[in-house]
Amino acid sequence: MKLIKHLFRVPWAALRIPRSYKKGSKKLYKWVRKNKKAQDETLYDYNYRWEYAVKKQNKLLKLMGVKVNVVGLENLPKGPFWMTPNHSSNFDGFYLVGNLGHRAKFAAVSREDLKDDKRSRGYLISSDSFFIDRDNLRQSVAALNAAAQYAKANARGICVFPEGKRSINTKLLEFKPGTFKFPQKYFLPIVPVSITGTLEARRWWALKERVVTITVHEPIRPSEHSRIESTRLAENVQKIIQHDLDKYYKSLDAKGKALFDKLQAKATIKQQKIDAKWLVKKEKYAQAKAAGKYEASYNYSTDTTFIPTPEQIQDVSNQSNTIKLNNTVASQNNTENNNNNSTGE
């Protein structure tokens, strides 16, 4: 019976998933534009848009034949938090919003070019997500800073992938310490989240149900992380998630491990091809910039890391302080000159 069900599901999914995904994004984007035009945020308010997105993404996962199990849902804070999941699939956002969205609301930190992608912009913009321009370090730091302030002010979560890019073969990449500077600055609890089973779940055409597991680990309270160096904190969070990934692999039977190894090998080759293309694109970008032909709308590869390092964050902070100091000195000098002119008169 299940086989027959999937025989009907697969061709239907091939037709419906791309269209339904884009249609949902278009509807959400349309609601945001109507709110802006009417200058009334209550027309299609945040809660209404969020509930629609949660239902829509669950329907798409069902159409894909993916079942999502959530472990440790009680660990997700109801107030502000900084969520740091591993990133190995284009559908990671769907897994998280569709299955954690009924417990907590959260925005994402994403690449700026996704703001113009009709397939995803509606989901991101309607949830008040933040966008990072990879070519503008100051804007990147400002966006992450604004995200932390937003979480604090609205008692909502922020989802940041600390690897800085997607790992197609599911092997955990180095966590960027810069990701953790902002929850430390604003005293937000950090919630490590591991997502397993995504490699097998990509096979939407498989004639059986695939299972993805989301594990919400115990949050790291501000009192526990505020005085730890961001580099060490990143390593600690990475170890938590890596332990879960290793545990998942060990839980597979011989057949499951063989399939996993096969899919991972194919994904590794694909990752290498993408990285090679990106290096060529990066070289062309550097040449264009050197020749003065750089365009702000230059489209990076989908797998370019965008998290600034702690040193870059500190440099931007120092530059901002210098600018503020110079403005203050200039203002004081103008005031003194005006006073002197008044006295002379």
Image (spheres, rainbow, N blue to C red):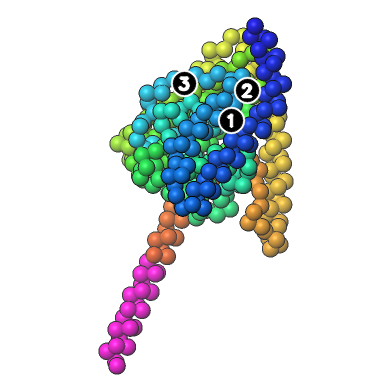
Specify the label residue 70 is tagged with.
Answer: 3
Name which of mark 3 and mark 2 comes first in the sequence. Answer: 2
**Residue 336 drawn above or below residue 271:** below
Q: Which residue in the protein does label 1 denote?
A: 91
Q: Nearer the viewer, residue 52 or 285?
A: 52
Q: Secondary structure at mark 1?
A: loop
Q: Residues within 10 Å of mark 3 (few under 14, many from 20)?
A: some
Q: Are marks 2 and 1 in contact (CB under 8 Å)?
A: yes
Q: Amino acid at mark 1?
A: Phe
Q: Assess disc 2: are there few (<14), some (14-19) or many (≥20) residues with their C-alpha within 10 Å of its C-alpha.
A: many
Quarter of image, res 210 = top right
- Is 305 contained in the magenta span? no
Query: Looking at the rendering, in which quadrant would you find the N terminus?
Result: top right
* Magenta-drawn segment: 325-345
- Which of 329/116 is in front? 116
* Residue 228 position within the rendered picture, expressed as x and y whole percent measured from the top left: 36, 39
Query: Cβ–Cβ below 8 Å for labels 3 and 2?
Result: no
Q: Which residue is mark 2?
A: 64
Q: Helix or strand or loop: what does disc 3 sit on?
A: strand
Q: Residue at x 43, y 37 (%)?
A: 47
Find residue 119 and report its horizontal and vertical position in percent: 63, 39
Q: Amino acid at mark 2?
A: Met
Q: Position of residue 169 (x, y in %)?
A: 63, 27
Please report the residue visible at 62 percent of the width from the left and 12 percent of the height from the top: 256
Residue 75 position (above or below residue 113)? above
On the question of residue 194 being in view, the answer is no
Name which of mark 3 and mark 1 comes first in the sequence.
3
Could you say which quadrant of the image residue 12 lies in? Answer: top right
